[in-house]
Amino acid sequence: MAGTIADHPVTEKKSIVTRRNFLLGSGAAAAGLALYSGEIARHEISIVTQEIVIAKLPAAFHNLRIAQISDIHFDEYTEPSFLRRVVAQVNSLKPDLVLLTGDFISVVPMGQKFAYGAIFRCADVLRGLTCPLRMAVMGNHDSFLGAPDIREGLATASIPLLVDQRIPIERDGQRLWIVGIDEPLTGHPNLNVAIPRRPDGPVILMSHGPDYADTILAHPRGQHVDLVVSGHSHGGQIRLPFLGALKLPEGAKKYSEGLYHLGPMQLYVNRGIGAVGVPFRLNCPPEITLFTLKSGTDG
């Protein structure tokens, strides 16, 4: 159809989308998304503050601040500079205790010799944590090296590795128990050994795999556990609008991120710091969690 404006002919133009133009546009969009998720979103640290109400929390531990870091996967895609930023952020929060819930290194892509060096390089950065009270557990990737090597590396940063072990924290004659269990997917946690039979204070338990919380809850000593802190899921790492996580690993398919109330026990799943498999995060930023313990009367 044609017309005239001021005696000049005007011809209607049709927009033609060719396969080539479509592919070029799609490729540019994909490249932009990859750049954003790999260089920007992967480094956008989210500090999540979470109050945890614990019944019969001793007064000495009211308002205790606990920072959690998980799933560093050092040197696969987590650069030293990025981990130094994480450490600086944790230090700025001035926690009373730092809990590190596993996967300090990665199984792939560089092999066992590289992973052995990575745990020492990771510990060298973690040495910058100013909070003197810090504890760790194994992750499934850490099992690639084994507890002795991970313990050796973390010891250089004065971070004890708890494998079915517990440590009491004492304040004003009152106690809080920190329990660390073996990695549920690759190890064999012994809850009878790890959890006190009759704890004289609340129990916070570190388990890399969050779905293991159901096993803890069903165990006779599970009734003594007030809070389980986990990682492993990465929150899905890549989350699409309306669809959620593209993939969740075994051991984190039921509980993937955030706080869950499981009867008398609470579970918190941290999204982790690093990336695994691919160097991308989307709608799922790296997380540092800061817990503040509150007495049951505050709830």
Image (cartoon, grey):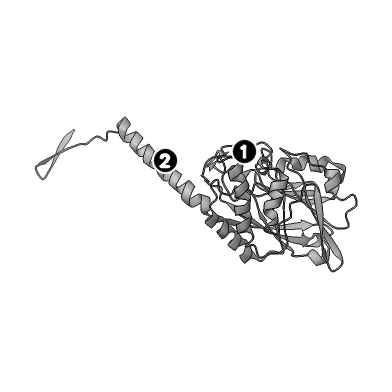
* Residue, far top: 19
Mark 2, residues whose alpha carbon is within 10 Å: few (<14), some, or many (≥20)? Answer: few
Residue at x-position 61% and y-position 41%: 112
> Callout 1, which amino acid?
Leu
- Residue 6 located left or right of residue 87: left
Q: Is residue 124 visible?
A: yes
Query: Which residue is tagged 2?
Result: 30
* Residue, far bottom: 172
Callout 1 secondary element: loop
Asked where in the image residue 108 lies, by quadrant, the reply is top right
Vertical placement of residue 209 versus 87, above or below: above
Residue nearer the viewer, 191 or 211 = 191
Rendered-image quadrant of the N terminus: top left
Vertical placement of residue 48 versus 11, above or below: below
Rendered-image quadrant of the C terminus: bottom right
Residue at x-position 62% and y-position 61%: 90
Residue nearer the viewer, 277 or 290 = 277
> Callout 2, which amino acid?
Ala
Q: Please tell me the numbered disc located at residue 50.
A: none
Residue at x-position 72% and y-position 45%: 147
Q: Position of residue 3 (x, y in %)?
A: 15, 37
- Residue 32 located left or right of residue 77: left
The number of callouts visible is 2
CB contact under 8 Å: marks 1 and 2:
no
Query: Which residue is tagged 1?
Result: 248
